[in-house]
Amino acid sequence: DQDVISVNNYGVNYNQLPASLRDQVNNVFFNVMSYHDLSLRERLTEGQLDRWADAMDQYDSRRKVRYGNSWFVNSDWPGGGNGTAASPFSSIYNALNSASASGDDMLYFKQTSTPYQTSVPGFIVVLNKPMTLRAMRGDGTGVWLR
């Protein structure tokens, strides 16, 4: 049960944990990849979802079961990145330029402390091709465009 996971990881029973750590325990206990009661398996973590999206883009054999590419953006990322979950673009512009014109690509925006720049003096971002924009779940800091 959740107490076993809690004690093994944090040294206290589940009901003694703060909400943030209870959520971590729940991510293990209710995870679809866990060995707990099958009827309770209902979650995947954000990291698992990111990994699945990356795997779909990386392996040709898996391209048959999805449309488009997944591009990750994190304005707090310190480098240019290549758009994967492990190395996201730091700029919305790079992600938009990488997305195909087919309309099948998806841009995942990580929650950050730095606003995503959608305009610079004299320029404005124009979405001139169809795509899906998705804000990632996280710690509640929010995804904001400016």
Image (cartoon, helix red, strand yellow):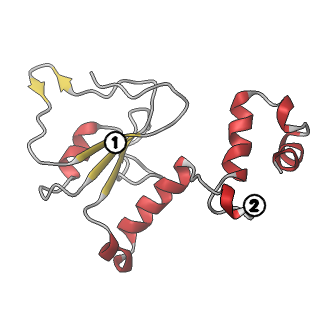
The location of residue 79, given as percent across then percent down, is 40, 41
The location of residue 21, given as percent across then percent down, is 73, 35
Left or right relative to 80: residue 3: right
- Is 123 above or below relative to 25? above
Three-letter amino acid code at disc 2? His
The location of residue 19, given as percent across then percent down, is 71, 29
Q: How crowded is mark 2: few (under 14 residues within 10 Å), some or many (20 or more)?
A: some
Foreground pick, 29 / 135: 29
Left or right relative to 132: residue 4: right
Foreground pick, 119 / 129: 129
Residue found at x 18% / y 48%: 97
Q: Quadrant of residue 90?
A: top left
Q: Label 2's element?
A: loop
Three-letter amino acid code at disc 1? Arg
Circles 2 and 1 in contact, beta carbons < 8 Å: no
Locate the C terminus by quadrant. top left
* N-term-proximal mark, 2 vs 1: 2
Left or right relative to 66: residue 53: right
Residue found at x 25% / y 62%: 68
Which residue is situated farthest in the front direction here? 39
Q: Quadrant of residue 96?
A: top left
Left or right relative to 62: residue 127: left
Q: Nearer the viewer, mark 2 or mark 1?
A: 2
Q: Label 1's element?
A: strand
The location of residue 124, given as percent across then percent down, is 12, 27
Tally of marks: 2
Q: Which residue is disc 1 drawn over?
A: 134
- Is 74 above or below relative to 83? above
- Is 4 above or below relative to 122? below
Numbered tag placed on residue 36 in the rendering: 2
Question: Could you give the CA–CA distance between mark 2 and mark 1, rounded to whole angstroms?
Answer: 30 Å
- Is 88 above or below relative to 48? above
